[in-house]
Image: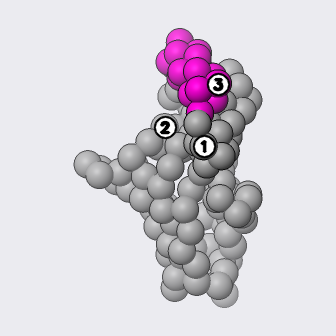
Amino acid sequence: MSDKFTVEIISPDQTILKQETNEVIIPSFEGQMGILNNHIPLITFLRPGIITIKAESEKKFYVEEGTVEFSNNNLLILTSSSKNLANFDKNKINEMLQKAETSLNTASTDKDRYVASYKFETLKEIS
């Protein structure tokens, strides 16, 4: 019996990734969540962070938001903000980091501060 399952990352205009994998780690609002073959069905929301896909090689994607559904050994990630870290431009990261810091300093609600802080910390980690 295989320990693999299918992961698919979809944006509004394209399929970013579709492959077999052994494990995926997602940044959900409940915390970092590891998904393995035969995980219980779930639906959750993404917070800013890094999606890690572990197969023959490891792939990482930065996301700011999205939804996740896992059922029947298919992980579907819907997001409009997925960026492959292997192709991330250093200047773009610095620009996004400055905007995230501004958002963090001007956030007016706890939810806005929560999201802005994860975005800022993740971008700081990437840079």
Q: Residue furthest front?
A: 108
Res. 115 image quadrant: top right
Q: Position of residue 16 (x, y in %)?
A: 40, 49
**The label number, if any, that marks residue 105 in the structure image:** 3
Vertical position of residue 87 compared to residue 7: above or below: above
Residue 7 visible, this angle: no
Q: What residue appears at the point 43 percent right and 52 percent down from the top-left corner? A: 79
- Asked if residue 3 is among those painted magenta in the image, a careful observer would answer no
Name the one closer to the observer, 115 or 21: 115
Work out how far the residue at label 1 is from the one at label 3, CA to CA, in angstroms: 11 Å
Q: Is residue 42 left or right of residue 19?
A: right
Expressed as whole percent of the image width and height from the top left, the position of residue 50 reads 64, 45
State the image quarter where residue 55 is shown. bottom right
Q: Which residue is mark 1?
A: 109
* Tag of residue 57: none
State left or right for residue 79 relative to residue 52. left
Residue at 51% x, 66% y is: 68
N-terminal label among 1 and 2: 2
Span colored in magenta: 90-107
User: Which quadrant is home to the C terminus?
Assistant: top right
Under mark 3, the amino acid is Asn
User: Disc 1 to disc 2, how far (Cα)?
Assistant: 27 Å
Q: Are marks 1 and 2 in contact (CB under 8 Å)?
A: no
Identify the residue under disc 2. 83
Label 2, label 3: how many angstroms apart (C-alpha)? 24 Å
Identity, as a three-letter code, of the amino acid under mark 2: Lys
Instruction: Tell me: residue 80, above or below residue 70.
Output: above
Q: Secondary structure at mark 3?
A: helix
